[in-house]
Amino acid sequence: MKLPLLYNKISLIMLSCLMLLISVAWSLMPVEYSKSELLGKINPSQNANFVKIDPQYTSKTNIYLRKETYIAYKSMHEAAKLEGVELRIVSAFRSFDKQKSIWNSKWTGQRKVEGKDLSKNIPDKYQRAKKILEYSSMPGSSRHHWGTDIDIYSLENTDFEKSNGLIIYQWLQLHASEFGFCQTYNEGRKKGYEEEKWHWSYIPIAKQMLIEYQNKIHYSDFNGFQGCETADSLNIINNFVFGINSDCVK
């Protein structure tokens, strides 16, 4: 084996071991999260637990992650780079208000869904909400509110089935767990969102926040956006917040 290749392999192993130790340490630390944090009703630029993502890691500007998530991502990014794989974040923390904007624009038809104005195409509010929920969360239910979840490379599943996208996805499937990340919305689930090959969650923190969410968030917290009255009937908390890859809750 050539020395540069051997060095890369050793570096990858060392990074993986370091991140495993960090993940274990974080999972053992008892932390409580406020309702505001769980619902995304915070300003990350004014929150000491968040950090702005450097331009070298993202195609966007002025986006944030929790510090622990960002540290883990940078290690994963470096490990991928050693193997010639370039990861790029296209979405990270998303506030309640940002999610509300996305949701309302789809609800009113301002933003088309599969080329259709849902306000005209699907007049029934429950069916309209279900259509939006294929790929978009109700405000207050998105894991992006937590600062633990990232979207990588593209927001189209087909982009991960060919060329560079396929290389990225295959690398993530093999190595993301070594850095604490898990594909939250995979194939084979019986409830929740459609598959998202781009969506990866930092489990050491997200798992704790999921427990806190179950204990603190109720359907009365779903308000202030169009169609919010459908949340209870559609069982958003059980079917969508908890409708995730079983590997992401272990």
Image (tube, rainbow, N blue to C red):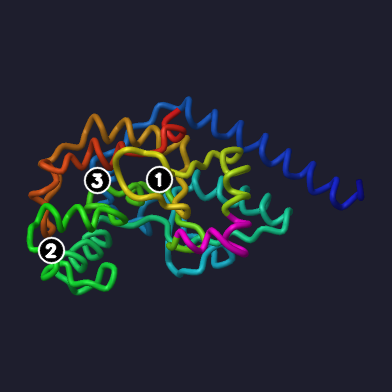
- Residue at image position (49%, 46%) is 69
Q: Amino acid at mark 1?
A: Tyr
First-in-chain label (2 vs 1)? 2
The magenta-colored residue range is 157-168
Left or right for 191, reference 79: left
Q: Secondary structure at mark 3?
A: helix
Left or right for 232, reference 250: left
Residues tagged 2 and 1 counted as in contact (Cβ below 8 A):
no
List the residue tagged with mark 3.
36
Q: Amino acid at mark 2?
A: Ile
Q: Main secondary structure of the magenta part?
A: helix
Circle 1 residues within 10 Å: few <14, some 14–19, many ≥20: many
Residue 236 image point, x, y percent: 20, 42
Residue 35 image point, x, y percent: 23, 41
- Residue at image position (48%, 29%) is 27
Label annotation for residue 116? none
Q: Secondary structure at mark 2?
A: loop
- Distance between the alpha carbons at the discs numbered 3 and 1: 24 Å
Q: Secondary structure at mark 1?
A: loop
Considering the image in quadrants, where does the C terminus appear?
A: top left
Label annotation for residue 185? 1
Circle 2 residues within 10 Å: few <14, some 14–19, many ≥20: some
- Residue at image position (29%, 56%) is 136
Q: Amino acid at mark 3?
A: Ser
Residue 169 image point, x, y percent: 57, 53
List the residue tagged with mark 2.
122
First-in-chain label (2 vs 3)? 3
First-in-chain label (3 vs 1)? 3
Q: Tell me, yes or no, whether the highlighted magenta stretch contains residue 48.
A: no
